[in-house]
Image: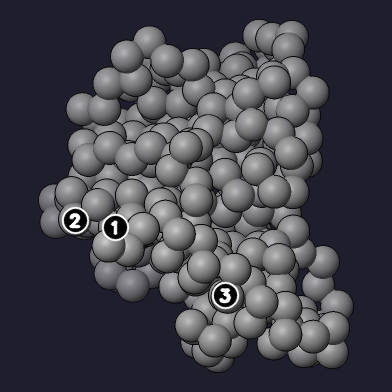
């Protein structure tokens, strides 16, 4: 009778050997083109195989190269924040809200174990049970199931059961799911919040209602034009989110996290909770949020109510 552990160990050794042979220095340089990355294919073959970015022979198909570079770039952009967390916490606990297929969860857990040599535990939450089951399988293949756990639940129903989370992340959580992640992170007093919003439709729906009612305002030409309404609302939504996080006591930056040729959904809202509160900054941000709502038609985000900000 075969020993599953021995079979898996043999598979891992063979894959790592193929990766070292395939990813020569010249081939790696051609892949990276001068980019500095934390996760290199010769060193992380098991992880990259688990998340579907390399083939069984350790080669990387062209369609997967873009994803490989994207996720490496995002991890690199989060590294300074993780460096700070590592100075304060011997064990970092993260919540990946709307984790999807868990690319980010597994990469951060792998970096903690193999790059930073620092305990990083991740809980991934997604409403799709089939996706969660796939995440669990990927974590087992990548030998990260000791530091990664996954739960099938809507974010609004997720119960952290009193657990401490130092960071809350959401990569392309759709529409108000990004606000769900932010509200959850603020409620947990997480020190780090990092979200890459997607399909910001809440504000656009409100503006569409203004157009249907014949409301007149300086932005009514935008409210009445579906394409312009969607595009403008996406940026205004993220501006409102940044102001609301500042009003909740966070330092916030909204930055481009991948080049626009890779994806148009390329804004990263990164926030951290400073050690010393600045009430005047929070008050100004709340005032600026209210002014932005008035200037754009009087439609705000439900996130404001959830955070107790009017």
Residue at image x 27%, y 37%? 151
Q: Is residue 219 visible?
A: no
Identify residue for label 2: 130
Residue at image x 74%, y 59%? 38
Up the image or down, 285 lies above or below 295; here it is above
Q: Quadrant of residue 276?
A: top right
Q: Nearer the viewer, mark 3 or mark 2?
A: 3
Residue 307, percent from left and from top: 40, 19
Q: Residues within 10 Å of mark 3 (few under 14, many from 20)?
A: many
The tally of labels here is 3
Q: Is residue 133 visible?
A: yes
Q: Secondary structure at mark 2?
A: helix
Up the image or down, 142 lies above or below 51; here it is above
User: Is 26 left, or right, of 47 in this rendering?
Assistant: right
Identify residue for label 3: 15
Spatial CA distance of label 1 from label 3 is: 21 Å
Spatial CA distance of label 3 from label 2 is: 27 Å
Identify residue for label 1: 134
Q: Are marks 1 and 2 in contact (CB under 8 Å)?
A: yes
Q: Residues within 10 Å of mark 1 (few under 14, many from 20)?
A: some
């Amino acid at each position: 009778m075969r020993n599953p552990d021995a079979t898996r160990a043999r598979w891992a050794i063979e894959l790592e050997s193929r990766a070292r042979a395939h990813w020569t220095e010249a081939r790696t340089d051609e892949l990276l083109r001068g980019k500095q990355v934390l996760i290199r294919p010769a060193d992380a073959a098991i992880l990259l195989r688990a998340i579907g970015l390399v083939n069984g022979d350790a080669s990387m198909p062209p369609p997967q190269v873009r994803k490989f570079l994207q996720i490496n770039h995002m991890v690199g952009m989060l590294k300074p924040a993780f460096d700070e967390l590592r100075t304060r916490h011997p064990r970092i606990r993260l919540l990946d809200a709307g984790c999807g297929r868990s690319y980010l969860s597994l990469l951060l857990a792998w970096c903690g174990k193999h790059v930073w040599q620092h305990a990083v535990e991740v809980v991934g939450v997604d409403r799709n049970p089939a996706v969660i089951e796939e995440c669990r399988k990927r974590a087992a293949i990548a030998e990260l199931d000791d530091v990664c756990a996954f739960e099938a639940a809507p974010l609004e129903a997720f119960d952290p059961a009193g657990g401490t989370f130092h960071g809350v992340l959401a990569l392309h959580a759709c529409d108000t799911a990004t606000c769900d992640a932010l509200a959850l992170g603020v409620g947990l007093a997480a020190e780090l919040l990092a979200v890459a919003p997607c399909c910001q439709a809440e504000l656009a729906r409100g503006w569409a209602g203004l157009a249907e009612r014949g409301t007149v305002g300086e932005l009514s030409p935008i409210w009445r034009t579906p394409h312009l309404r969607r595009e403008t609302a996406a940026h205004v939504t993220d501006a409102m989110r940044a102001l609301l996080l500042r009003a909740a006591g966070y330092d916030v930056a909204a930055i481009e996290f991948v080049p626009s040729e890779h994806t148009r959904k390329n804004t990263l809202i990164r926030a951290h909770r400073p050690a010393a509160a600045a009430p005047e900054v929070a008050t100004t941000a709340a005032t600026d949020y209210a002014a932005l709502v008035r200037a754009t038609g009087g439609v705000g985000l439900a996130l404001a109510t959830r955070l107790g900000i009017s």
